[in-house]
Image (tube, grey):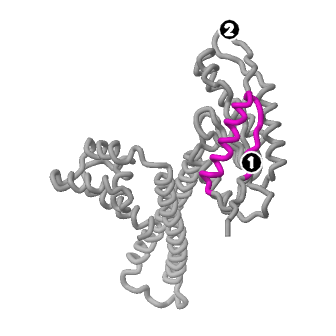
Amino acid sequence: MSKAQFLRQAVKRMSQQGAGLHPFSYAIWYEYVSGINRDLQIALDARLTTEGKLDDPAACALYYKHVADLDAKTALRIGDSVGDLVGQVADSATHAGDQASHYSDSLERWSATLQHPANAKEAQPPGLAEILRGTRDMQKAISDLQERLENSSREAQELRHEVARAREEALVDGLTGLANRRGFDLALTACLQQDLPSGHGPCLLMIDLDRFKRLNDTHGHLFGDKVLAGVGEMLRANVKGKDTAARFGGEEFAVILPRTPRGGAVGLAEALRALVAASRIRTSGSKQLLIGNITVSIGIADYVAGESAAEFIARADQALYAAKGEGRNRVNLAPRPQAEVVNK
């Protein structure tokens, strides 16, 4: 069954309930009819068996218990489904508007023929005046329909853009403006599916703020947020093109370099490390101070054919913690795994 069919089924089931047609209700019924949430299906079936219909409190309770924590992948899938259906509605509205316009033109020509017959001496057929009134009423109705269809098409396109924007926002970290962990995972998966000659990438940088807890304890969490946002701004300014900068989690960042070899990755990492070390960030409050000595440690791994995304990340992470162990504020390149020797 297609996504659009799931959406239509969900809307139909929603309209049969006592609950309002709100986003909670939509989310419940979409997951129910698409079969992607087994626990919700069981709970909803039990509720319908005992109560017959869902009211607003029941719908909200089911949403918060079974849907509110849905993962980003499911949210994006629902967004895609809405986008597909909206696209179909927009296309249908445009087509219907074209057909209505053609029909209106035909009525206009027919009306003109009746009003001005070729033989002026011929008597007008009975009921002509009534037919002409009906024709004009039909033309007005078609004109109104065209206007409504045009408005619907415009609103559908706007909704499609809203869905696309929501999808993008679902992959962005709100504080730093970088890709969030979900966005990082998707970018890394796409990166590892490319086919590049050995030694041409990809490379991965794992970046961690040094002694971040001390910064928070000394200057407060608001200052800590300013530091995170500042590092995010530096990464956005220096990571361009097909490369991806992400907030991996907490005070840890990541940079995916799909087409950068080891040497280029080391050069970028050193530039980023020096840029952060030279930065000064102003504290908030009445006594504003410029705080320096903010540093990062960076681990780098270049991809080895055949390793999983988790193994790739783990090697870069190991290099990161080696850099911290060597004194922080430094870059460390992970060694490439040794090929296994097979004894014959």
Residue 50 in the image: state x and y as whole percent: 15, 52
Q: What residue range appears in magenta? A: 308-336
Callout 1: helix, strand or loop? loop
First in sequence: mark 1 or mark 2?
2
Report crowding for label 2: few under 14, some 14 to 19, many 20 or more residues within 10 A (C-alpha): few
Report crowding for label 1: few under 14, some 14 to 19, many 20 or more residues within 10 A (C-alpha): few
The residue drawn where x is 59% and y is 51% is: 310
Residue 194 in the image: state x and y as whole percent: 70, 63
- In this rendering, position of residue 36 left or right of residue 273: left
Magenta-drawn stretch contains 74:
no
Which label sits on residue 287?
Answer: 2
User: Can the viewer see residue 147 in this picture?
Assistant: no
User: Can the viewer see residue 297 in this picture?
Assistant: yes
Between 74 and 153, the residue placed more toward the observer is 74
Q: Is residue 109 above or below residue 239?
A: below
Q: Is residue 252 above or below residue 292?
A: below
Residue 292 in the image: state x and y as whole percent: 75, 19
**Label 1, on which residue?**
335
Inspect the image, locate mark 1, and give the three-letter code of the amino acid beneath it.
Pro
The residue drawn where x is 80% and y is 31% is: 275
Callout 2: helix, strand or loop? loop
Tell me the distance, in whole angstroms, between the alpha carbons under discs 1 and 2. 46 Å
Inspect the image, locate mark 2, and give the three-letter code of the amino acid beneath it.
Lys
Q: Quadrant of the C terminus?
A: bottom right
Q: Is residue 274 above or below residue 191?
A: above
Give the mark count. Answer: 2
